[in-house]
Image (cartoon, rainbow, N blue to C red):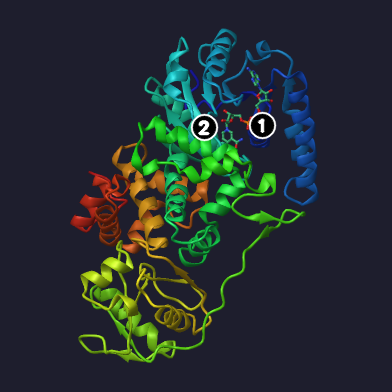
């Protein structure tokens, strides 16, 4: 069998579609001989022609020498029959996502390749153990899950099936490094790492929208400009398209036996049925212009009239300090009494609670109470979210909007929601990341690596939880669970224990 110190030289790729072509590109550039086979006889030849054009472009941009481009192209050979893959050290299959077809292919490959050849599947949703079970030698079968577009997405999930030999995965991890990619190692569980960890953002965004808390665009703006993500959940869904992402949401939910944390939303089911797929259909959560530009709905202008004075709740001492520092810098006057004066705007800073519960719980006048999300540090230009209760007067809402926008920082006003928008989405992402660690699907380091490289989040879920504080994330989740009664917010034991012990979420058990 090929081992870690006997680097594979000949790589077979079956399936010359988007993924097979991408894998062929990075493998040929890394110096491997690549044999490319597809049941569609034109596909492998077309893939080579397309890659020749890609290499030409890289040469024109100065990213590749002409000699290297030529050598890489020479190493790429389309094959007319599967039998030509006989000399391969490793074969990666990237055919369509159907278990029976992939099993049949692996069986055919076993009859063609040598006993030491490793067989890897690029499946994004099928069980590696099930694929291995179809083979005579399941110990040589593993997952090697690349992301699209392969040359740009520098992470590969390497997956152990239950009967995969550790040496198989070690060799594939080495191979991924040779491609210039970062391998992360994951157990064979639905969604592996990236698609599992990615459940939080979309399902919670949809849940917030379904409660009428804010519009799709407002939720996206908060996630981008307050929470620091590159894309909000609805921009992301428009990009991946609902015909892809809705079935994935349903599949992962069912594969985890209706785990509430992954519950999909009827919002996407209805929109999918209506053909509002996203960017590719020209209509999704956003409208798109003829040239494909996303049309952003306009934002309401901030009012100008500041409140006479502002009383801040002391229920959350750190948030109280931060808001008391912010308000004078915005031209606001603080009301520092134990109780709010009769003309004061009341600002509460709950974690995981809604404005209603905070006002009622603290015996405050709900008509003058507005909540401000204080989970993340305030900074000039970093979007702020304020939240009303059904009893908050328009006067108080507008005064709060004027105040928190007085330095030109954008403000989003949302309806009542336990945990605003950012708190809910962030706590959900952290909690799911913690549970992936708890289930020992991957190491804490690999979970964070997979999420930053595979999903482009500013931080991995565990590092994100640490940056805010595990105890605060736990508080958000506990309050969310208490108020909603929904088990999707039940905190992972990984988070609960580390929050109580004052440990980092990246701390594994020794
Ligand atoms: N596209 C993505 O974003 C993405 C990302 C990660 C993983 N994947 C996975 O990668 C695999 C391939 O996806 P894709 O997007 O490249 O698909 P694709 O439809 O672009 O290409 C699949 C290719 O496989 C060929 N094929 C089908 N059956 C075959 C067989 N029995 N033998 C040989 N060739 C066969 C088809 O002719 C086609 O050229 C799937 O398992 C998919 O789940 C896709």
Residue at the spot 63% in from the left edge and 47% down from the top edge = 278
Q: Secondary structure at mark 2?
A: loop
Which residue is farthest top? 111
Residue at the spot 28% in from the left edge and 62% down from the top edge = 472
Of labels 2 and 1, earlier in sequence is 1
Work out how far the residue at label 2 is from the one at label 1, CA to CA, in angstroms. Answer: 18 Å
CB at disc 2 and ligand 1 closer than 8 Å: yes
**Disc nearest the viewer among 2 and 1:** 2
- Where, by quadrant of the figure, is residue 334 drawn? bottom left
Residue at the spot 38% in from the left edge and 47% down from the top edge = 445
The disc placed on residue 124 is 2
* Other residues around mark 2 within 10 Å, as few (<14) / some (14–19) / many (≥20): many
The location of residue 377, given as percent across then percent down, is 39, 72
**Vertical position of residue 277 compared to residue 287: above or below:** above
Asked whether residue 179 is in view, the answer is no
**Vertical position of residue 173 compared to residue 381: above or below:** above
Image quarter where the C terminus lies is top left
Q: Is 153 left or right of 70, judged from the image as shown? A: left
Q: Is 155 left or right of 42, judged from the image as shown? A: left
- Where, by quadrant of the figure, is residue 151 drawn? top right
* Other residues around mark 1 within 10 Å, as few (<14) / some (14–19) / many (≥20): many
For this rendering, which residue is in front, 433 or 219?
219
The location of residue 66, given as percent across then percent down, is 79, 42
For this rendering, which residue is in front, 262 or 371?
371
The location of residue 235, given as percent across then percent down, is 57, 54
**Vertical position of residue 481 compared to residue 329: above or below:** above
Residue that mark 1 sits on: 24
Asked whether residue 477 is in view, the answer is yes
- Say whether marks 2 and 1 touch (CB < 8 Å): no
Q: Secondary structure at mark 1?
A: helix
Q: Point out the quarter of the image occupied by ligand 1.
A: top right
């Amino acid at each position: 069998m090929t081992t870690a110190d006997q680097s594979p030289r000949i790589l077979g790729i079956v399936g010359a579609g988007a993924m097979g072509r991408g894998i062929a590109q990075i493998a040929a550039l890394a110096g491997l001989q690549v044999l490319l086979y597809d049941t569609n006889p034109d596909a492998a030849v077309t893939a080579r022609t397309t890659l020749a054009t890609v290499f030409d472009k890289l040469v024109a941009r100065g990213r590749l020498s002409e000699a290297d481009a030529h050598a890489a192209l020479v190493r790429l050979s389309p094959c007319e029959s599967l039998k030509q893959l006989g000399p391969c050290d490793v074969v990666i299959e990237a055919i369509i996502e159907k278990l029976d077809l992939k099993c049949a292919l692996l069986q055919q490959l076993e009859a063609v390749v040598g006993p030491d050849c490793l067989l890897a599947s690029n499946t994004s949703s099928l069980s590696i153990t099930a694929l291995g079970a179809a083979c005579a030698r399941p110990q040589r079968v593993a997952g090697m899950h690349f992301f699209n577009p392969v040359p740009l997405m520098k992470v590969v999930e390497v997956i152990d099936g239950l009967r995969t030999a550790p040496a198989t995965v070690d060799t594939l991890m080495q191979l991924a490094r040779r491609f210039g990619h970062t391998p992360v190692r994951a157990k064979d569980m639905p969604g592996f790492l990236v698609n599992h960890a990615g459940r939080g953002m979309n399902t919670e965004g949809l849940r917030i929208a379904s409660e009428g808390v804010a519009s799709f665009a407002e939720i996206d703006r908060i996630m981008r400009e307050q929470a620091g993500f590159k894309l909000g959940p609805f921009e992301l869904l428009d990009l991946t398209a609902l015909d892809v992402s809705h079935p994935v949401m349903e599949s992962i939910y069912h594969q985890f036996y209706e785990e509430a944390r992954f519950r999909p939303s009827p919002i996407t089911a209805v929109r999918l049925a209506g053909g509002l797929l996203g960017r590719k259909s020209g209509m999704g959560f956003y409208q798109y212009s003829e040239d494909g530009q996303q049309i952003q709905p306009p934002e309401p202008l901030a009012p100008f009239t500041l409140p006479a004075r502002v009383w801040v709740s002391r229920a959350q001492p750190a948030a109280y300090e931060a808001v008391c520092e912010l308000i004078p810098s915005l031209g606001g006057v603080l009301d520092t009494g134990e109780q709010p004066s009769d003309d004061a705007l009341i600002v509460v800073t709950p974690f995981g609670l809604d404005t209603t519960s905070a006002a009622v719980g603290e015996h405050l006048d709900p008509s003058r109470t507005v909540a401000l999300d204080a989970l993340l540090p305030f900074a000039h230009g970093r979007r702020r979210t304020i939240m009303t209760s059904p009893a908050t007067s328009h006067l108080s809402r507008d005064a709060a909007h004027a105040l928190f926008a007085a330095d030109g920082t954008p403000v989003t006003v949302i309806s009542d929601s336990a945990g605003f928008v950012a708190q809910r989405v962030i706590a959900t992402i952290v909690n799911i990341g913690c549970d992936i660690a708890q289930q020992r699907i991957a190491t804490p380091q690999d979970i964070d690596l997979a999420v930053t490289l595979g999903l482009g989040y500013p931080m991995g879920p565990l590092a994100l939880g640490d940056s805010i504080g595990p105890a605060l994330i736990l508080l958000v989740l506990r309050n969310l669970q208490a108020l909603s009664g929904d088990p999707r917010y039940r905190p992972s034991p990984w988070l609960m224990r580390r929050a109580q012990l004052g440990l980092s979420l990246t701390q594994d058990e020794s």
